[in-house]
Amino acid sequence: MPARERPRMRLGHDKRLPLTLGVILVVGFLSVNLYSFTVSSNAVREMLVQNTLPLTSNNIYSEIQASLLRPIYVSSLMAHDTFLIDWMAQGERDTDQVIRYLQAIQQKYEVFSAFVVSALTLRYYHHDGVLKTLSEDSKKDQWFFTMVPHPNAYRVDIDTNEADDNQLTIFINHKIIDTDGRFIGVTGVGLDVANMSQLIADYKARYDRDIYFVDRRGIIQSHADERLIGTADIHERAGISAIADQILSGEQGSLVYSGDRGPVFLRYRFIPELDWYLLVEQGERAAVARLRTAFYHNLAAGAVVTLIVLLISTYTVRRFHERLARMATIDRLSGLYNREAFEALFARASASARRYGQPLSLILFDIDLFKHINDQHGHLAGDRVIEQVAQLVQRGRRANDLLARWGGDEFVLLLADCDLAAAHRLADGLRQAVSDAIVVPECNRPLTLSLGIAAYHQNDTLDELLGRADEQLYRAKAAGRNRVASGA
Ligand SMILES: Nc1nc2c(ncn2[C@@H]2O[C@H](COP(=O)(O)OP(=O)(O)OP(=O)(O)O)[C@@H](O)[C@H]2O)c(=O)[nH]1
């Protein structure tokens, strides 16, 4: 049956189920994903504050301790070296001697620089020679004069190195005390800040966290961005300024501040060896970046699954509706349209005939003495005959003609663009074809039809048209069956 001919029968809303499924899936996927994203983000945050950042801080602290231990040890060794103490006590006579000593230290321990400054002469001896004489008036030399009242034996300072193009250097300054307990100078080694910065940059790459040091005043002393060193103050930096005092008054702890890209989790720890604070921080965005990516991937997967379910359910529902529509419009035994479908299709065909002013004829036909076939050969044989007639007429009809089983052994054939005379000829041909092709089961007589034809009149109802065709059919039966009767 051509699809375009199928009568439109509302058998349900075939979009409702896929839509409902779609909504349930979208809401389900969204809520499950959002929930798991929120739970995992909270877990990551908690992990960051309670575990990851403190652990990182501890690891770095240990590494710092390990990397400073050696230079501090070397400085201490120099400060207690009897050669140096004696040499100073004896009036710093042979300069070459002390320079060779400093060179040996610098080479042996592979430090950036080795130096000694005398409190007596204020001369600054460097492994390359005598650098200068310190002056109490020079701002640059204050580090030395502040060493005297310093409570500890050594101090870690960060400063530009005049002996090496003013490069930033970490100095381990160690007091030299003579045998009488008097302060006679400072000795120590210098470490390249670039190395330290590299170390911190490595941490950043390894842990994806910002790691830097500030002194007790809040001035950044070591940072992957060297421009900040010695100049930037955390009291003046956006976000962290709000918690700067809290950091600088504690030993260690975890804090949160709002950075320009969301909350930043910070772990601070005071490092007594450096007299600095170690700060380890990580933005929430970076911490949950992977989760966010997973969230988007899950959503995409959910969208694909939803789409597939929508397609499958739409296809299934459509197939189901088509079957239902077929069941509701097709007569099971003959495979022809049933009465309801014919009524709907007639309305369309008659409207078209009216619009284009074309003739329309209806043939109502009935198998002659069908009851006998049933009675003598059984209902199944009768059914078989109905099938045969239906198939034969269906095959012979024109594409625009509508054929339906009207009930029992009665059929209707609506002939589009066909006047009464042409319909009569066609009906007779049909009658002939059936009696030529089909025999009554088990008795060799040909099966015959009686056919009544009526022409469609403007504004006829189906009942009116059928009524007139039925009269003609009655006439054909009355006249002895196996014939065609027609009338306007
Ligand atoms: N096998 C079968 N029989 C049916 C079916 N529907 C109706 N019938 C029978 O078809 C017969 C119809 O008989 P009628 O059309 O009234 O009478 P007839 O024997 O064909 O005689 P005329 O129409 O006067 O030639 C009845 O016996 C119905 O029981 C069906 O689906 N299958």
Image (cartoon, rainbow, N blue to C red):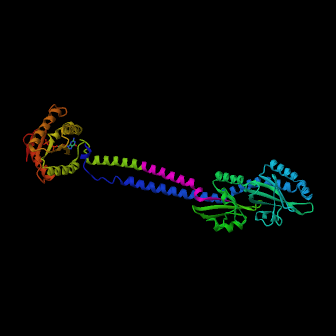
What residue appears at the point 31 percent right and 48 percent down from the top-left corner? 324
Hey, which residue is sitting farthest top in the picture? 444
What residue appears at the point 42 percent right and 54 percent down from the top-left corner? 22
Q: Quadrant of ligand 1?
A: top left
Residue 85 coordinates in the image, percent (x, y) = 90, 57
Q: Is residue 240 magenta?
A: no
Residue 33 coordinates in the image, percent (x, y) = 51, 55
Q: Is residue 282 magenta?
A: yes
Q: Is residue 407 visible?
A: no
Compared across the picture, whether 331 is left or right of 219 comes to left
Q: Is residue 274 above or below residue 445?
A: below
Magenta residues: mostly which secondary structure? helix
Q: Is residue 315 above or below residue 155?
A: above
Q: Is residue 264 visible?
A: yes
Compared across the picture, whether 434 is left or right of 103 comes to left
Compared across the picture, whether 240 is left or right of 376 comes to right
Residue 42 coordinates in the image, percent (x, y) = 59, 59
Image-quadrant location for residue 228: bottom right
Relative to the observer, which residue lies in front, 275 or 208?
Answer: 275
Compared across the picture, whether 294 is left or right of 216 comes to left
| Number of marks drawn | 0
Which portion, as a residue range, is magenta?
Answer: 279-308
Q: Quadrant of the N terminus?
A: top left
Image-quadrant location for residue 236: bottom right
Residue 467 coordinates in the image, percent (x, y) = 12, 50
Relative to the observer, which residue lies in front, 178 or 243?
Answer: 178
Relative to the observer, which residue lies in front, 446 or 349?
Answer: 349
